[in-house]
Protein backbone atom coordinates (compact mmCIF):
# COMPACT_ATOMS: atom_id res chain seq x y z
CA UNK A 1 0.00 0.00 0.00
CA UNK A 2 1.29 3.44 -0.91
CA UNK A 3 2.30 6.09 1.60
CA UNK A 4 2.77 8.82 -1.02
CA UNK A 5 0.57 11.79 -0.04
CA UNK A 6 -1.80 12.96 -2.79
CA UNK A 7 -0.57 16.10 -4.58
CA UNK A 8 -3.53 18.16 -3.30
CA UNK A 9 -3.08 17.14 0.37
CA UNK A 10 -3.51 19.87 2.98
CA UNK A 11 -0.30 21.42 4.33
CA UNK A 12 0.18 20.79 8.06
CA UNK A 13 -0.84 23.57 10.42
CA UNK A 14 0.68 23.85 13.88
CA UNK A 15 -1.66 22.85 16.70
CA UNK A 16 -2.00 26.02 18.83
CA UNK A 17 -1.80 23.82 21.96
CA UNK A 18 1.56 22.32 20.92
CA UNK A 19 4.66 23.51 22.82
CA UNK A 20 6.54 26.48 21.27
CA UNK A 21 9.78 26.23 19.22
CA UNK A 22 12.76 25.06 21.27
CA UNK A 23 10.65 23.47 24.01
CA UNK A 24 11.00 19.81 24.98
CA UNK A 25 8.06 17.68 23.89
CA UNK A 26 6.36 15.33 26.34
CA UNK A 27 6.74 11.56 25.89
CA UNK A 28 3.89 9.63 24.23
CA UNK A 29 3.38 7.80 27.50
CA UNK A 30 5.65 7.27 30.49
CA UNK A 31 5.92 3.53 29.73
CA UNK A 32 6.91 4.12 26.06
CA UNK A 33 10.11 2.19 25.22
CA UNK A 34 10.99 4.87 22.67
CA UNK A 35 10.78 8.05 24.74
CA UNK A 36 9.67 7.10 28.26
CA UNK A 37 12.07 7.36 31.19
CA UNK A 38 11.86 3.65 32.06
CA UNK A 39 14.28 0.70 31.96
CA UNK A 40 14.64 -0.66 28.43
CA UNK A 41 13.65 2.63 26.80
CA UNK A 42 15.83 4.16 24.06
CA UNK A 43 15.21 7.43 25.90
CA UNK A 44 14.74 9.39 22.69
CA UNK A 45 14.38 13.07 23.68
CA UNK A 46 12.65 15.58 21.39
CA UNK A 47 12.32 19.33 21.03
CA UNK A 48 10.11 21.46 18.80
CA UNK A 49 12.01 22.81 15.78
CA UNK A 50 12.41 26.52 14.96
CA UNK A 51 9.44 26.44 12.55
CA UNK A 52 7.12 25.14 15.31
CA UNK A 53 6.10 22.13 13.22
CA UNK A 54 9.20 19.96 12.79
CA UNK A 55 10.79 18.06 15.67
CA UNK A 56 14.45 17.52 16.58
CA UNK A 57 15.24 14.34 18.53
CA UNK A 58 18.34 12.94 20.20
CA UNK A 59 19.20 9.25 20.57
CA UNK A 60 22.39 8.23 22.38
CA UNK A 61 23.49 4.86 21.00
CA UNK A 62 24.56 2.59 23.87
CA UNK A 63 25.95 -0.93 24.24
CA UNK A 64 22.44 -2.35 24.76
CA UNK A 65 21.37 -1.06 21.34
CA UNK A 66 23.97 -3.14 19.54
CA UNK A 67 23.23 -5.51 16.66
CA UNK A 68 26.51 -6.34 14.87
CA UNK A 69 29.70 -5.95 16.96
CA UNK A 70 29.92 -2.31 18.06
CA UNK A 71 27.15 -1.21 15.72
CA UNK A 72 23.56 -0.09 16.23
CA UNK A 73 20.84 -2.70 15.59
CA UNK A 74 18.64 -1.72 12.63
CA UNK A 75 15.45 -2.40 14.58
CA UNK A 76 16.57 0.05 17.26
CA UNK A 77 17.10 2.73 14.62
CA UNK A 78 13.60 2.03 13.31
CA UNK A 79 12.23 2.36 16.84
CA UNK A 80 13.99 5.71 17.29
CA UNK A 81 12.67 6.92 13.92
CA UNK A 82 9.14 5.66 14.69
CA UNK A 83 9.27 7.53 17.98
CA UNK A 84 10.62 10.75 16.47
CA UNK A 85 8.11 10.69 13.59
CA UNK A 86 5.38 9.87 16.11
CA UNK A 87 6.38 12.96 18.07
CA UNK A 88 6.33 15.15 14.95
CA UNK A 89 2.64 14.45 14.39
CA UNK A 90 1.83 15.67 17.92
CA UNK A 91 2.72 19.17 16.69
CA UNK A 92 -0.25 19.17 14.36
CA UNK A 93 -2.85 16.66 15.48
CA UNK A 94 -4.22 14.32 18.18
CA UNK A 95 -3.24 10.73 18.97
CA UNK A 96 -2.39 8.44 16.08
CA UNK A 97 -0.71 5.09 15.55
CA UNK A 98 1.85 3.95 13.01
CA UNK A 99 0.18 2.12 10.12
CA UNK A 100 3.29 1.87 7.91
CA UNK A 101 6.95 2.73 8.43
CA UNK A 102 9.54 2.56 5.66
CA UNK A 103 13.20 2.89 6.59
CA UNK A 104 16.43 3.15 4.58
CA UNK A 105 19.63 2.27 6.42
CA UNK A 106 22.33 4.42 4.82
CA UNK A 107 25.38 4.21 7.14
CA UNK A 108 26.46 1.93 9.99
CA UNK A 109 26.07 3.65 13.36
CA UNK A 110 28.80 2.99 15.97
CA UNK A 111 27.91 2.32 19.60
CA UNK A 112 28.88 5.43 21.57
CA UNK A 113 27.64 7.85 18.91
CA UNK A 114 24.72 10.25 19.11
CA UNK A 115 22.04 10.39 16.45
CA UNK A 116 20.18 13.64 15.81
CA UNK A 117 16.85 13.11 14.10
CA UNK A 118 14.81 15.70 12.26
CA UNK A 119 11.17 14.89 11.45
CA UNK A 120 8.15 16.68 10.12
CA UNK A 121 4.57 16.15 8.98
CA UNK A 122 4.43 16.40 5.19
CA UNK A 123 0.69 16.22 4.68
CA UNK A 124 -2.67 15.51 6.29
CA UNK A 125 -5.56 13.83 4.50
CA UNK A 126 -8.53 13.03 6.75
CA UNK A 127 -7.20 10.65 9.42
CA UNK A 128 -4.00 10.00 7.43
CA UNK A 129 -0.82 11.74 8.59
CA UNK A 130 2.20 11.51 6.29
CA UNK A 131 5.47 12.00 8.16
CA UNK A 132 9.15 11.78 7.22
CA UNK A 133 12.49 12.15 8.95
CA UNK A 134 16.23 11.55 8.87
CA UNK A 135 18.80 10.45 11.45
CA UNK A 136 22.13 12.33 11.33
CA UNK A 137 25.35 11.06 12.84
CA UNK A 138 26.96 13.20 15.53
CA UNK A 139 25.29 16.53 14.74
CA UNK A 140 22.14 17.89 13.13
CA UNK A 141 23.79 18.37 9.75
CA UNK A 142 25.98 15.26 10.14
CA UNK A 143 26.06 12.35 7.72
CA UNK A 144 22.63 10.77 7.14
CA UNK A 145 22.61 7.32 8.76
CA UNK A 146 18.96 6.52 8.06
CA UNK A 147 15.78 7.96 6.61
CA UNK A 148 12.13 7.08 7.16
CA UNK A 149 8.67 7.77 5.79
CA UNK A 150 5.57 6.78 7.63
CA UNK A 151 1.82 6.81 7.52
CA UNK A 152 0.14 7.37 10.88
CA UNK A 153 -3.62 7.02 11.31
CA UNK A 154 -5.44 9.23 13.76
CA UNK A 155 -7.29 7.21 16.42
CA UNK A 156 -9.45 8.17 19.38
CA UNK A 157 -8.81 7.20 22.99
CA UNK A 158 -11.12 4.17 22.39
CA UNK A 159 -8.30 2.56 20.39
CA UNK A 160 -6.14 2.37 23.50
CA UNK A 161 -9.05 1.52 25.81
CA UNK A 162 -10.12 -1.32 23.54
CA UNK A 163 -6.70 -2.83 22.87
CA UNK A 164 -4.49 -1.84 25.81
CA UNK A 165 -3.82 -3.88 28.95
CA UNK A 166 -6.52 -3.07 31.57
CA UNK A 167 -4.05 -2.67 34.45
CA UNK A 168 -2.00 -0.10 32.51
CA UNK A 169 -5.15 1.80 31.52
CA UNK A 170 -6.40 1.79 35.13
CA UNK A 171 -3.05 3.16 36.26
CA UNK A 172 -3.67 6.05 33.82
CA UNK A 173 -7.03 6.75 35.49
CA UNK A 174 -9.47 4.85 33.25
CA UNK A 175 -12.19 3.02 35.22
CA UNK A 176 -12.95 -0.68 34.67
CA UNK A 177 -16.44 0.33 33.41
CA UNK A 178 -15.02 2.68 30.76
CA UNK A 179 -12.57 0.02 29.61
CA UNK A 180 -15.33 -2.62 29.43
CA UNK A 181 -17.62 -0.23 27.54
CA UNK A 182 -14.89 0.48 24.95
CA UNK A 183 -14.28 -3.26 24.50
CA UNK A 184 -17.90 -4.14 23.92
CA UNK A 185 -18.75 -1.11 21.70
CA UNK A 186 -19.24 -1.79 18.00
C1 LIG B 1 -5.99 5.82 28.13
C2 LIG B 1 -5.41 6.58 27.02
C3 LIG B 1 -3.96 6.30 26.66
C4 LIG B 1 -3.42 7.15 25.50
C5 LIG B 1 -1.99 6.87 25.19
C6 LIG B 1 -1.54 7.62 23.92
C7 LIG B 1 -0.28 7.02 23.43
C8 LIG B 1 0.09 7.46 22.02
C9 LIG B 1 0.90 6.37 21.43
C10 LIG B 1 1.76 6.78 20.25
C11 LIG B 1 2.44 5.55 19.73
C12 LIG B 1 3.61 5.83 18.84
C13 LIG B 1 3.75 4.91 17.67
C14 LIG B 1 3.43 3.47 17.95
O1 LIG B 1 4.17 2.75 18.56
S1 LIG B 1 1.95 2.88 17.35
C15 LIG B 1 2.06 1.08 17.57
C16 LIG B 1 2.20 0.35 16.27
N1 LIG B 1 1.01 0.46 15.47
C17 LIG B 1 -0.10 -0.22 15.71
O2 LIG B 1 -0.22 -0.97 16.68
C18 LIG B 1 -1.22 -0.03 14.75
C19 LIG B 1 -1.93 -1.35 14.49
N2 LIG B 1 -2.89 -1.16 13.40
C20 LIG B 1 -4.15 -0.74 13.66
O3 LIG B 1 -4.56 -0.58 14.80
C21 LIG B 1 -5.01 -0.46 12.44
O4 LIG B 1 -4.54 -1.17 11.32
C22 LIG B 1 -5.06 1.07 12.10
C23 LIG B 1 -5.66 1.86 13.29
C24 LIG B 1 -3.66 1.62 11.78
C25 LIG B 1 -5.92 1.25 10.83
O5 LIG B 1 -7.14 0.64 11.06
P1 LIG B 1 -8.51 1.43 10.75
O6 LIG B 1 -9.58 0.39 10.80
O7 LIG B 1 -8.63 2.59 11.64
O8 LIG B 1 -8.29 2.00 9.31
P2 LIG B 1 -8.47 1.24 7.89
O9 LIG B 1 -7.81 -0.10 7.89
O10 LIG B 1 -9.91 1.33 7.52
O11 LIG B 1 -7.61 2.20 6.95
C26 LIG B 1 -7.94 3.57 6.81
C27 LIG B 1 -7.20 4.09 5.60
O12 LIG B 1 -5.77 3.99 5.83
C28 LIG B 1 -5.20 3.15 4.83
N3 LIG B 1 -4.15 2.31 5.45
C29 LIG B 1 -4.26 1.58 6.60
N4 LIG B 1 -3.13 0.93 6.85
C30 LIG B 1 -2.26 1.27 5.85
C31 LIG B 1 -0.94 0.90 5.55
N5 LIG B 1 -0.23 0.07 6.34
N6 LIG B 1 -0.36 1.43 4.46
C32 LIG B 1 -1.04 2.29 3.63
N7 LIG B 1 -2.32 2.66 3.87
C33 LIG B 1 -2.92 2.15 4.96
C34 LIG B 1 -6.31 2.29 4.30
O13 LIG B 1 -6.05 1.82 2.98
C35 LIG B 1 -7.47 3.27 4.33
O14 LIG B 1 -7.31 4.15 3.23
P3 LIG B 1 -8.63 4.66 2.42
O15 LIG B 1 -9.25 3.43 1.87
O16 LIG B 1 -9.50 5.34 3.45
O17 LIG B 1 -8.07 5.61 1.41
Image (cartoon, rainbow, N blue to C red):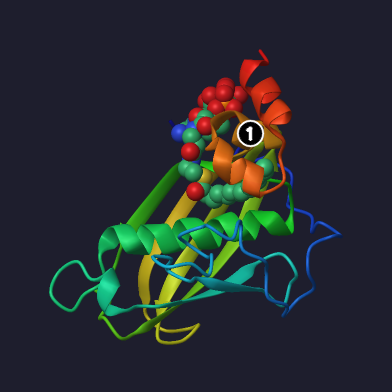
Mark 1 lies on a secondary structure that is helix
Judge whether 159 appears above or below 92 on screen.
above
The residue at the point 13 percent across, 75 percent down is 69
Where residue 174 appears, as percent x and y from the top left, is 71, 40
Location of residue 7 (image quadrant): top right
13 vs 26, left or right, is right
Which residue in the rendered view is the most extreme toward the left? 69
* Quadrant for the N terminus in the image: top left
Looking at the picture, tell me which residue is in the foreground, 178 or 141: 178
Q: Can residue 112 be seen from the camera position used here?
A: yes
Where residue 131 appears, as percent x and y from the top left, is 57, 52
Asked whether mark 1 and ligand 1 are closer than 8 Å, the reply comes as yes
Q: Which residue is mark 1?
A: 161
The residue at the point 57 percent across, 55 percent down is 86
The residue at the point 69 percent across, 56 percent down is 90
78 vs 18, left or right, is left
Please tell me how many numbered marks the rendered image carries: 1
| Category of crowding for the residue at label 1, using alpha-carbon neighbours closer than 10 angstroms: few (below 14), some (14–19), many (at least 20) | many
Where residue 38 appears, as percent x and y from the top left, is 48, 67
Judge whether 179 appears above or below 172 on screen.
above
9 vs 39, left or right, is right
The residue at the point 80 percent across, 73 percent down is 20
* Quadrant for the C terminus in the image: top right
Where residue 161 appears, as percent x and y from the top left, is 63, 33
Judge whether 141 appears above or below 84 on screen.
below
Which residue in the rendered view is the most extreme toward the top? 186
Q: Can residue 4 be seen from the camera position used here?
A: no
> Dividing the image into four equal quarters, which quarter contains ligand 1?
top right
Location of residue 59 (image quadrant): bottom left
Location of residue 119 (image quadrant): bottom right
Amino acid sequence: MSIEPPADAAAPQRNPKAPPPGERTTSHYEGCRGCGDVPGSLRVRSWVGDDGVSVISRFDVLEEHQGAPGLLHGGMLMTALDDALGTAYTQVTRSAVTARLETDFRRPVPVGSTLWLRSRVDALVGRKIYVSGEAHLGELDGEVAGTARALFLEVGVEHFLRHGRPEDLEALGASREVIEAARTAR
